[in-house]
Amino acid sequence: MNIGSWRFRNNSVYSKRSSWSGKGKNIASWAETDLTALQSRLTVGKTSTGSDVFDSVQFMGIQVSSAKEMLPDSLTGYAPVVRGVATSNARVDVRQNGYTIYSTNVAPGPFAISDIYPSNLSGDLHVTVIEADGTKNSFIVPYASVPNMIRQGQWQYQLTAGTYQNGFTAYTPDFIEATVSHGTRYDLTPYGGIIVAENYRAGVTGLSKSLGSLGALSSALSFSETHRVAGDSKTGTAMKLMYAKSLAKTGTEFKLTGYRYPGSGYYEYADAVAERDRWENGRYRNIYWDNRNYYDDSDTTDSMQAHRHVYYTRHFPTRRQKVDVYVNQQIAGKASVFINASGQSYWGASGIDRSLQIGLNNSFRDVVYGLFIQDTQSNHHDNDRSCNLSVSVPFNVGKSRTVMANFSASHNKADGNGFNSGASGSLLDDNRLSYSVQTANAQGSSLINSANLGYQGSIGNVDAGYSYGGGTRQETLGLAGGIVAHSGGITLTQPLQNTFILVEAKNARGTRLENQPGAAIDPFGYAVMTSAVPYHHNRVALRTADIKNGVDIPNAVKDIVPTYGAIGRIKYDTFTGQSLLIHSTHRDGIVPPLGAAALSSAGISKGIVGTNGDIFISGANAGERILVKWGEGKEESCHFLIPDLRSKKGEITAGYRETTLVCAQN
């Protein structure tokens, strides 16, 4: 909801399963407004701190921060691509900080999700693939933001005051956090910050430097003091190193993030909160889920609780070191290889968290193939290994349709070998309707056949699926959309993003938007472009080929620059009626002069007199009075009435009609 310059937002989730009663969660509620003069934004409510200096945490309170989106060449946030393999018609849930931030259905075979919006700019994404038979495969996708370089003369800051709230800890201390970065000469960006909280203090200072052709480097030194629940205090330091390098000529992209904690006394703010929250009768409570059955603590079903493990330790484990490495290399032609590796060890614990993903993507002519290998291990010694090979072959159907034939073979430690094959494609003129059919076979099980359809409609998106085999059957239905209430009524839309545009074009029902498949003007004269780039020019265009006979839209393309979170509004002038080419005459066969204006009774321009007195008029209605004017004097104008030239059925014909009219003296 927008009221003036204030944006009010809520993000909630409600879940209901047959095995337990429904449960709702308020992930975040907040209000925000731009402080344009300061190129900043004020936020009040439940949201998250940034991660440029400290690890991001969720809180309830107030925050003032610089708005990078207002800068002409602002940096965009980083989010990882989540890759995995489904052996059946499965659901993929992505969680961060205990909350579900993304959920979708996928067909059997490899998948890659690139439209996830994490609540933080760095951390771990917990991915769960829930198969049709209820089996759950889980893995963690670690990621980190790029070095926080900013341009010379720019400032970035954030001041936060509130209460720590991550959704699952009973201990919620108050805190204040302040961070600042400044771009200086010689491509240097010094930055720092402090946190002052109940039982916790921390500070960090760092420096980022562009190394020119050698990449960019960022290093930081942190200090923390933690008053622990047992009554003692711990102090410690941490060192952080970030490096990024991209070589356009060789097609190389490299990112490295390393953390080193010389002793066990350094606590991140989230660790300090967890240390008090997990304390029970002189020991620390630890909970973990089997690697293949990770789920949140709200799932109380017996089958899930059987995979929930609780144990107690006398020592609270803190980080010892952590390394994240990402490499993407373009090879000859269209081939590319990527490596995503992460490892983390702890003080007071013998296990390590380790994840390795290696992939190859290539194409031969029109055939696309890829190889994906994954190896994971948690500090609880759960581990899994998988390998998948996929091949896609296009087949042309008709003049403009392509059907993709897909095949994949997989192997993992738990399930053994698996194979699936199928086809996918899209229909309709703007590919609004997508489809896929698959047949999958896992080791030791029966064939599972599935079919999926997806449709992008003007009032929302629909996804439907059906699968059967191995004694099971599954039907899925997904509906996604938005509702916009405005002064003109209520408009149903496709799923809404943070900033979007309401389009008004009366009497233009069925006319589609050029840059959004499926979106069209509804019977009430409205449509919504569901995603817009704030502080940038956004082109909004109607498809002129869809404009029906008898409707004229003189300017079908407009431009708008919305602010962050705005609901922009664009109104198109539409005229209904006939399109006429009028051969006009005046007194004694003399025609009105070239360039004279043809105006409606309301003074709206309807056309201009051309050579030989010809006037082209659109959106004209029978009986309408048109004034032709070429001066201010009475003798410098004349008028005529529009005749009814509709067909015998009362319909307005396509194109335009010609007629000769006498322009009478006023």
Image: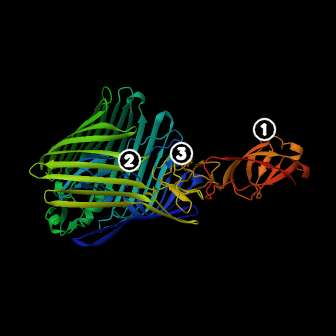
Task: Point out the tag, 3 or 1, that comes first from the N-terminus.
Answer: 3
Identify residue type, mark 3: Leu
Provide the residue designation for mark 2: 427
Residues at marks 2 and 3 touching, judged by CB atoms closer than 8 Å: no
Q: Residue at x 30, y 35 (%)?
A: 327
Q: Earlier in the sequence, mark 1 or mark 2?
A: 2
In front: mark 3 or mark 1? 1
Pointer 3 residue: 71
Q: Name the element at disc 1.
A: helix
Give the foreground label among 1 and 2: 1
Query: In what element is the residue under mark 2?
Result: strand
Which color scheme does this rendered protein use?
A: rainbow
Amino acid type assigned to the residue bearing label 1 in the image: Thr
Binning the other alpha carbons within 10 Å of mark 3 as few (below 14), some (14 to 19) or many (20 upward) gives few
Q: Residues within 10 Å of mark 2 (few under 14, many from 20)?
A: some
Q: Quick check: marks 3 and 1 in contact, CB under 8 Å?
A: no
* Residue 665 in view in this figure: yes
Q: Residue at x 23, y 70 (%)?
A: 18
Residue furthest out toward the left: 444
Question: Residue at label 1?
Answer: 611
Spot occupied by residue 496 in the image (x, y as percentages of width and height): 45, 57
Say whether residue 375 is left or right of residue 501.
Answer: left
